[in-house]
């Protein structure tokens, strides 16, 4: 087996609010390999978003270390492009195309023509090419999210970090976006670290699922979900995994809640 | 699996048949969209409605002044316009306006530049932020014109004093709005910017400033309005001993000579320039930037 792309060892994360020092995660280990769809799943307060921000380089662990391709993470960078939950991550003063080209321009590694070609290719992949010259405020929630995903993928990051990207969407759009994300993954084979609080979403999207318990977040389990690829959601294997996760998070014997 | 609670609930509901339908073709429904009538569109236009209000005011003014028939107190609208146009053409009024605008631009530009420096300091350091917050809280409520006596002591009669009060009039409004705008930049937008690898001045220029552009523009607008009002007031106060006065001085002079129509013409010019800058220049900038971007309705 090859070395993991992303590796966290004994990561304890803390952050301060106005009154308190909170421990978000306690000695969390995880390994993400190239091409994996790695899901961090847990109830609110399990520090999953904080963990993602630490991988993004916005927060340093007070204990333990996080390594990307064998190098410790120091500060944010475009090798770990992030997609957030809310729509304010897009720059309202730039068109859809402007938003997607922006990180390419910041890196100053390509010629103007190449930048535009890459951005248009990325927009085509998320079916937004015809909206290239529209400003974000004219788009629907799902379209804004697709712009954010295109903007992240255009940089061809080592790993794509997604912080509950579909949580603010309506249920139908969310399901649609999940299917599109899987298609993109099939097409491009990127590595993704995806945070969610929805068991259903984790089972639908993940190839491997890390379960965190709450207050503070500790590893509860790590499960495989790759065997579900290509199966219909009505397949009993989905229900079995969903129930198993539910039991691990909330204790056995209770009815699965609508996640 | 059967849910006992749901089973019990459903028992109370009357049985109803299910059905499915195919939506009708749009062509059969008729016009889904239809253009509005000319009258509706005309009265829907804000410029047309407001223009009508303006004409109404002018007519009322003309009628009342004619009925009063004391042009020393209340000249007619037509007389005011006549004096206004005559003075504009003869160069008396236009020269005054230019003098005023020149001083205004100096003061305004200096205020904007100073605001940029102070805001940069406030964004860069926490103590800078604290200092600026206190200063803004102190000076923002102080009307700029109240500083004129002090300015006269420090800088004497002349442009220097007016520029000083103009800076005071613009600076704090701009600083206050800009800093508020920076603070209101959404957290995820900030994180996106840093995620792309932006730092320091590039981060401020490419993320914070455009994201706060609506507030910055509002600050510039308020600053301009303050400056314009302050300038006219200041010119009125010591227009008496200044040789090359501006618009305020023009109004003051006309009053001295009891040329009331000229006083009105001066006020007319003040309003017109104020309107022109606020609702033409700033409105255009807004329409091309923050409104277009959906950052302001």
Image: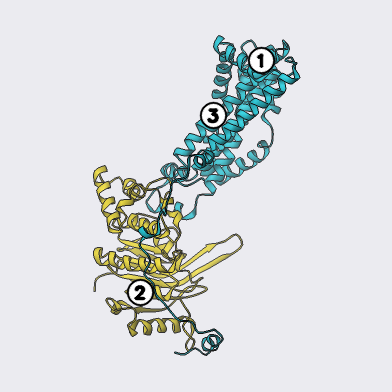
Chain colours: A yellow, B cyan
What subunit carries mark 1? B
Residue B50 vertical position relative to residue A190 in the rendered view, above or below? above
Q: CA distance from mark 2 to mark 3?
A: 57 Å
Per the rendering, the mark at residue B262 is 1
In the rendering, at what x and y percent does residue B14 appear? Answer: 53, 84
Residue at 61% across / 33% down in the picture?
Answer: B53
In the rendering, at what x and y percent does residue A155 appear? Answer: 30, 54
What subunit carries mark 2? A
Between residue A155 and residue B7, name the one nearer to us: B7
Give the residue number, with chain letter if any, for mark 3: B277
Residue A103 vertical position relative to residue A182 in the rendered view, above or below? above
Give SS at disc 2: helix
Between residue B185 and residue A95, name the one nearer to us: A95
Per the rendering, the mark at residue B180 is none
Q: Are marks 3 and 1 in contact (CB under 8 Å)?
A: no
Residue at 46% across / 59% down in the picture?
Answer: A86
Per the rendering, the mark at residue A204 is 2
């Amino acid at each position: 087996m090859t070395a993991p792309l992303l590796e966290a060892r004994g990561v304890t994360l803390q952050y301060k609010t106005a009154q308190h020092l909170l421990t978000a995660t306690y000695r969390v280990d995880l390994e993400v390999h190239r091409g994996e769809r790695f899901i961090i799943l847990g109830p609110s307060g399990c520090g999953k978003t904080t963990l993602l921000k630490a991988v993004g380089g916005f927060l340093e662990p007070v204990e333990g270390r996080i390594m990307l391709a064998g190098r410790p993470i120091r500060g944010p960078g475009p090798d770990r492009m992030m997609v957030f939950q809310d729509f304010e991550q897009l720059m309202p003063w730039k068109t859809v195309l402007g938003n997607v080209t922006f990180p390419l321009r910041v890196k100053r590694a390509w010629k103007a023509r190449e930048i535009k070609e890459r951005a248009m290719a990325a927009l085509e992949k998320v079916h937004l090419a015809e909206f290239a010259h529209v400003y974000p405020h004219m788009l629907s929630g799902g379209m804004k999210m697709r712009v954010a995903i295109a903007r992240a993928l255009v940089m061809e990051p080592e790993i794509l970090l997604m912080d509950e990207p579909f949580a603010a969407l309506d249920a139908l759009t969310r399901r649609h976006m999940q299917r599109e994300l899987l298609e993109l993954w099939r097409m491009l084979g990127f590595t993704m670290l995806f945070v969610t609080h929805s068991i259903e979403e984790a089972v639908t999207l993940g190839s491997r699922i890390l379960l965190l318990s709450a207050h503070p977040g500790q590893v509860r389990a790590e499960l495989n979900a790759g065997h579900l690829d290509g199966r219909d959601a009505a397949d009993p294997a989905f229900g079995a995994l969903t129930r198993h996760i539910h039991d691990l998070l909330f204790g056995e014997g209770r009815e699965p809640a609508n996640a | 699996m059967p849910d006992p609670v749901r089973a019990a609930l459903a028992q109370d509901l009357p049985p109803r048949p299910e059905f499915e339908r195919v939506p009708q073709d749009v062509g059969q429904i008729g016009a889904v969209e239809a253009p509005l009538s000319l009258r509706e569109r005309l009265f829907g236009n804000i410029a047309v409605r407001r223009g009508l209000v303006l004409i109404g005011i002018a007519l009322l003014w003309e009628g009342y002044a004619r009925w009063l028939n004391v042009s020393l107190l209340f000249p007619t609208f037509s007389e005011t316009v006549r004096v206004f146009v005559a003075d504009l053409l003869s160069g008396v009024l236009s020269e005054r306006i230019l003098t005023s605008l020149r001083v205004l631009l100096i003061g305004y530009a200096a205020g904007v530049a100073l605001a940029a420096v102070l805001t940069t300091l406030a964004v860069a350091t926490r103590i800078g932020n604290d200092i600026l917050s206190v200063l803004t809280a102190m000076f923002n409520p102080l009307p700029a014109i109240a500083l004129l006596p002090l300015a006269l002591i420090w800088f004497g009669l002349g442009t220097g004093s007016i520029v000083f009060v103009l800076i005071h009039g613009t600076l704090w409004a701009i600083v206050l709005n800009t800093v508020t705008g920076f603070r209101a930049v959404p957290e995820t937008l900030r994180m996106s910017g840093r995620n792309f690898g932006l730092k320091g001045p590039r981060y401020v220029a490419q993320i914070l400033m455009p994201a706060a552009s609506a507030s910055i523009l509002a600050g510039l607008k308020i600053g301009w309005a303050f400056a314009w009002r302050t300038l006219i007031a200041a010119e009125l106060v010591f227009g008496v001993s200044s040789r090359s006065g501006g618009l305020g001085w023009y109004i003051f002079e006309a009053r001295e000579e009891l040329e009331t129509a000229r006083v009105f013409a001066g006020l007319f010019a003040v309003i017109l320039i104020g309107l022109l800058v606020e609702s033409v220049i700033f409105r255009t900038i807004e329409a091309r930037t923050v409104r277009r971007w959906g950052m302001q309705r």
